[in-house]
Amino acid sequence: EAQEQRWRLDENRGELMGWIDLFPFSDGPERVHDAIFMLSDQHRSPYALRRLLETIPQSPADTAFVMLERLAADIPAFLGDSQWTSAVLKLNTLEAAVAVLEHLSEGRIPGGDGFHLSSELTRLAISLPDFHRILIERYLALPPGNTRRVLEMAMDDLPGEDNFMALFEGNVQAPHPFQHLGRALRNLAISRRPSEQWRGAFEEFGLPLKGI
């Protein structure tokens, strides 16, 4: 019926987006995929479904992750859309963080200028210690290039001896290695933790150098 009444598909004044926006809050949010594939290609683009990407992270994290990964599998254009990546990272789970890292490492999602993506990876590595460990392992396994640069930007703001030694190993052959290690050196003595008072903020605190 909607295909016959094109006004219902108009993203600005039709019924489509208001209807799809409610799917993450329904009893069967995964059914959104069936609804999406009733649409034309034009209305299945990441841009046309951008409001859906804003609402999916409000579902339970495990359900939202499955929905976002299926969207990308069924419509690969989502992998190239930064809003899809942001939606996955908003889930704040180890599974979601590792998935983005894997997609990035395999070249399936773009790193762009690295600033936003690296800051999100830093945030998750502080909140999820297991992800910090996986981030270090992946950084050491990657060859020099843009993807490794994004991971390095994320690790520049992370504390810990293992983090510093990984960056040191990654930069030891660089023409001016210590130009890239200044912040990492600082983070040997200063660490960060999520603030108990301000959601999304972090507190810095000193580390005993004798313990390093």
Image: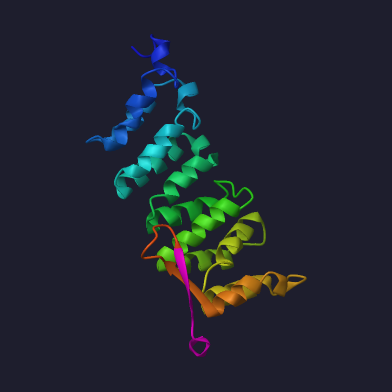
Q: Residue furthest top?
A: 4
How far from the left and from the top, in percent, is residue 25?
27, 37
Quarter-of-image position of residue 37: top left
- Looking at the image, is 172 positioned above or below residue 7? below
Q: Residue furthest right?
A: 175
Q: How does the figure colour the protein chain or chains?
A: rainbow
Q: What residue appears at the point 49 percent right and 41 percent down from the top-left corner?
A: 83
How far from the left and from the top, in percent, is residue 54?
41, 38
**Is residue 116 in the magenta section?**
no
Residue 26 appears in the rendering: yes
Q: What residue appears at the point 50 percent right and 55 percent down from the top-left corner?
A: 120
Q: Is 155 situated left or right of 60 in this image? A: right
- Looking at the image, is 180 positioned above or below residue 59? below
**Is residue 206 in the magenta section?**
yes
Q: As rendered, which of 109 and 87 lies closer to the eye?
A: 87
Tell me where the magenta segment starts and ends, as one range: 202-212
